Image: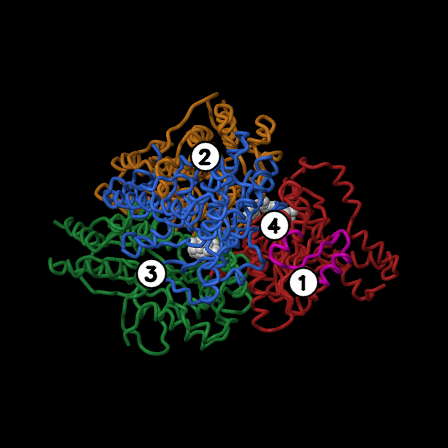
Chain colours: A orange, B green, C red, D blue
Amino acid sequence: MQTTYLQAVGAALQEEMRRDDKVLIFGEDVAEFGNIFGVTRGMLEEFGPQRVRNTSISETAIIGTALGAAVTGLRPVAELMYADFTMVAFSEIFHCVAKWRFMHGEAYKVPLVIRCAMGSSFGAGAEHSNCVESLFMHAPGLTIISPTTPYDAKGLLKSAIRSDNPVLFCEHKQLYQTKGEVPDGDYTIPIGVADVKRPGTDVTVVAVGLMVRRALEAAELLQKEGISVEVIDPRTLVPFDKETVFQSLRKTHHVVVAEESNKTAGIGAELAAMIQEEMYDELDGPIGRVAALDIPIPYNIALEKYVIPDAGRIAEAVRAQLARNC
Amino acid sequence: MQTTYLQAVGAALQEEMRRDDKVLIFGEDVAEFGNIFGVTRGMLEEFGPQRVRNTSISETAIIGTALGAAVTGLRPVAELMYADFTMVAFSEIFHCVAKWRFMHGEAYKVPLVIRCAMGSSFGAGAEHSNCVESLFMHAPGLTIISPTTPYDAKGLLKSAIRSDNPVLFCEHKQLYQTKGEVPDGDYTIPIGVADVKRPGTDVTVVAVGLMVRRALEAAELLQKEGISVEVIDPRTLVPFDKETVFQSLRKTHHVVVAEESNKTAGIGAELAAMIQEEMYDELDGPIGRVAALDIPIPYNIALEKYVIPDAGRIAEAVRAQLARNC
Amino acid sequence: MQYTAEFLKGVYRDLLSVRLFEEKQVEIYALGKVPGHIHSGIGEEATYAGVLATRKPGDYFKITHRPVGASRILGTPLETMFGELMGRSTGNARGLGGVLHMVSRENGMVGFSGTLGCDIAVADGAALSIQMAGTDNVSYVFYGDGTSSRGPVHEAMNLAAIWKLPVLFICNNNQFAISTAASYGVPVANPGADRAAAYGMPARTADATDALAVYDAAKELVDGIRAGSGPAVLDCKCYRWRGHFEGDQAKYRDPAVTEEWRKKDCVAIMEARLQEWNVLTAEEIQRIRDEINSEMDQAIAFAEASPEPTVEDLYRNLYAD
Amino acid sequence: MQYTAEFLKGVYRDLLSVRLFEEKQVEIYALGKVPGHIHSGIGEEATYAGVLATRKPGDYFKITHRPVGASRILGTPLETMFGELMGRSTGNARGLGGVLHMVSRENGMVGFSGTLGCDIAVADGAALSIQMAGTDNVSYVFYGDGTSSRGPVHEAMNLAAIWKLPVLFICNNNQFAISTAASYGVPVANPGADRAAAYGMPARTADATDALAVYDAAKELVDGIRAGSGPAVLDCKCYRWRGHFEGDQAKYRDPAVTEEWRKKDCVAIMEARLQEWNVLTAEEIQRIRDEINSEMDQAIAFAEASPEPTVEDLYRNLYAD
Ligand SMILES: Cc1ncc(C[n+]2csc(CCOP(=O)(O)OP(=O)(O)O)c2C)c(N)n1
Ligand SMILES: Cc1ncc(C[n+]2csc(CCOP(=O)(O)OP(=O)(O)O)c2C)c(N)n1
Ligand SMILES: [Mg+2]
Ligand SMILES: [Mg+2]
């Protein structure tokens, strides 16, 4: 069945709530309003006000409450309206949620999911457009998922809800209305397994979030130039599926990492550093990083588009890889 | 004059407060108590309760207040007791302080310094031992300084206070009692200039914070084995002095980055990614990353020591670099 | 009548200029001229017009995302406001900050954070500048009923209280935080005033459909602050006429209640009163409206004719030299 | 006498076991047996002994960094407590969590964050579990006067209030946050109770040199919570006898005042009263002391004989399988 990414997320929530009455969701405007993007529409009606709850504007309490609920046997799905707001509960996520089990012992289980709407979305400006994965990759103890298709979103959200570890689940705003095939009913996708979104032989592009789509566009473009691009979507950033990337690399010997966040200390920093460290001899050149410019996201839309990589910029980075071969 | 790092920080504060009555300091326990490490001891007596102020335990208010004070003409030095607490004011630093000028225009100047005591210090555990530079390297708009000697600490803190841009100034707890030569009176060190702490010819070690000392120890060790290590201390992480590192690399063709924070998405991730991207052809092997294990800092001191790199681990990484030459 | 005609005309002009700005904003948004998302503040103008009638030179101000037109009261040039709103290089932040950031430093505005609540303590900082300078100025900080539940608001109030900073905290209680009614999200009737005692601060509540009632309550608190009594809280109750953002159909609330509140229009109330008091005639009112509207039309034309910011503009404001 | 002898003996044993744990902690710290930094809670035991006398099975608890010995009241085995305190593999977190994290999940303890305040809402979450299960249990959360100024405390109280969660917020007001007196850092007299009205919560204050006074006040609030009236706040006023951490000479306060407070020793007060009421004799008291001390000495010997955690232990608790 063709469904949107938004519907897929909603279906995962709905099915998991039907399956397990320990699952409940809360956050700002998730009840009557069904969340500002409509993700939780209908949930209040089906599951009632005990399991679908609005909160006050209190992000630290949302996260803290989720943590306490998880430790005492519920499986909360906490929503932060925008991924940017992970930063107002940063300590609660980084110090508490991530390290709770480590600091208190194995009797403490933290089965919670933090969902948030991430990324640029045309004119949302410097405080409502951020991607945050790289910040939390530095927090041992978290699982970080960034799905890019309806199929992945549904299957991974189900796995996240069933996981006994805390998961940061990043939904991309620009993907909410994109469509894809999603089988009816229950299925899960294992956490920590990358997906080759397009096979290819010349250059490996590891793309995250919205950049998966742009990388696929770039691959299409490049095919016309006779360049075969393999696009890998890690889907989960922690744990990271190194092996799928390494396998690809053994074939292509060229890697470009594409992400939407600022370049400095972004996801690409970690991936490039890790790949060159572990696979140096397989590389025929430096790993390219395609990322947003190191600037807050500007309000002006033309400049917003300029700051965030497009297919053209990814294609350029791929060509630069191959130019080194000559 | 030989002074401690702690005294050097104190002297910089004192001299700048004497020089410019727009400078004031506030934070938890900075007044009578002189800060929990003693850095601001005597300041209240000299400058009075208007310019040396205790706050409540309100880190977001400390940062917000510093921002408002800076925008309206003061030059606040705000203290967060531990660097870990930057995370409780993360949004205020990342979204507000860093982007304020960008979001509001050039009429807005943000001359403020956030000082914090950083790093491991024997048994302080998972929430009081963190290094945070890499998190904030992802926030365009900030200047980030991590001095490692009394001389650097004093000169750079003065530059930070005189800067019209917001500065995160990280003081390492384990360095507070270390001594070094500091000239009497006023001098500054320019922001964004690295320092070659030890010249060498075989391998470049870019070390940050406490790891500068450990890298120097490692260099000493390795010298006995006939290996000549150049130790570079970036001193400021943003802006980063690429040229000094590149110059060294043109000579050694081998780089190891040493830091104290978790490896994944740490400082070394960015530096390794950047160096391989920009200087690939000068490299004779992969850039080595020496960092803390990807685990919260454990309370048990033997394990804390195990998690954080020591001179031996840096030396090993250097040897691994050269082993590739054969 | 306890107010001078001059004063009343000033308050009215402020009130109206916010209303007309807010209406204009909705209008040009519908025409696709605004790149970002706007939050209409129609119905909430009296909070600003009333409170800001107590201001004097040297005061500082932190406004919010609603009504953004309030920036006009403080003197922000319409050209830079519309420039910013429309993402043009003539905006105060060269079109990079956007709809939430139409401010002017030269008029005492300290800025705004779209991460609601994180900027409340910025007003403490401005008040600290005032306290260090030893003047009798005030730092005004506006925030919403929903925002009142955020932690940084608590921290900022606490610090202002212990340092006795000259801050007036103004809670613009429009009774909603997106879809969440204040009656649900806030466990007290007055999200500002009922929390003031937690910091030992004096507080007042005001009917913010009436700019003069707001002024009176604010004046009492501001006089105290200027006299050195430390921070205070003012609660202004009004109602958000439109959806949270344009496009929000506000199905989460009763249209009949909305209708009731729309009848208590702060602009109409003020106009009726000024006519009754013979301060302004219907014709004069119309003239003022026309004046403001034509100023805005000119500013919009100017903004539209302004160049988009360039790639060079991007880095210009990131760091000061 | 309104209390049973059984009850009084129980409260006394709790009080004393915290005191003796705290003393033991100071003692072994001075001997260099504790790797981390400890915060002595001597003088503050009555807050815990009094409040926790209202508990029943199924309740949840969030304690603080002071007095950490309170974990003992809830049943955390001394072996895992000293194991954790001394950084040994027999600690509840294998010696990786440390002095701040001596807890037991099986006794309802939800954990603690050394980033003060960030964990207050964890008690809301535990209360949510109770609310979903529909029992009359209570989630108890302790925090300090200094911590009361942190934003997350405000957020947690607000959310507990709007969801009517069964939470008892207990402010252990020992009058200091490191060197900062509550009289400076908190703008109200009672950092807990005086802020309860901001959330429409009932509140009580108690003299926390008297465990029974604490119990009485807590009981009233807890009965209400169990009956479904939603969250409440209890303020317990006591005094931190020692420095903030061991080594702090507390020069920021008047030793004469400290002396005055030391005279109001909650343990001595309880002992005198129990003897007066013929609940315990001096000999019985001594026997209880000896019993507790010898249990502790055994546990310390056990911990000292326990292996240090290994490198394999490091990753064992990071993720659940
Ligand atoms: C920290 C934070 N959380 C959530 C949001 C999303 N958000 C934007 S406006 C809004 C409602 C604000 O309510 P209120 O403070 O009453 O102001 P109003 O919109 O009614 O003017 C919310 C939740 C935000 N911008 N910042
Ligand atoms: C968020 C945060 N800020 C600062 C600290 C440092 N700190 C540790 S204990 C303490 C004082 C706490 O005072 P209070 O809440 O009254 O508890 P007490 O120590 O008196 O028991 C402070 C400021 C911290 N641990 N966490
Ligand atoms: Mg509102
Ligand atoms: Mg205290």
Disc 4 CB within 8 Å of nearest ligand 1 atom:
yes
Give the number of the mark in front: 1 or 4. 4
- Frontmost residue, A292 versus B264: B264
The answer to whether the residues at label 4 and label 3 have Cβ atoms under 8 Å apart is no
User: What secondary structure is marked by label 2?
Assistant: loop
| Rendering coords of residue B300 (x, y %) | 28, 48
- Residue furthest top in the image: A184
Question: Are tags 4 and 2 found on a single chain?
Answer: no
Residue under pointer 2: A72
Magenta-colored span: C194-222
Amino acid, disc 2: Thr
Q: In the figure, C22 relative to B186: above or below?
A: above
Residue closer to the observer: B24 or B41: B41
Q: Nearer the viewer, residue C230 or C61?
A: C230
Label 1 and label 2: CA atoms lie apart by 52 Å
Closer to the camera: disc 2 or disc 3? 2
> Residue C95: where, in percent of width, then height?
56, 55
Q: Nearer the viewer, mark 4 or mark 2?
A: 2
Which amino acid type is shown beneath numbered disc 1?
Leu
Q: Amino acid at mark 3?
A: Lys
Number of marks in picture: 4
Kind of residue sitting beneath label 4? Ser
Residue to which mark 4 is pinned:
C148
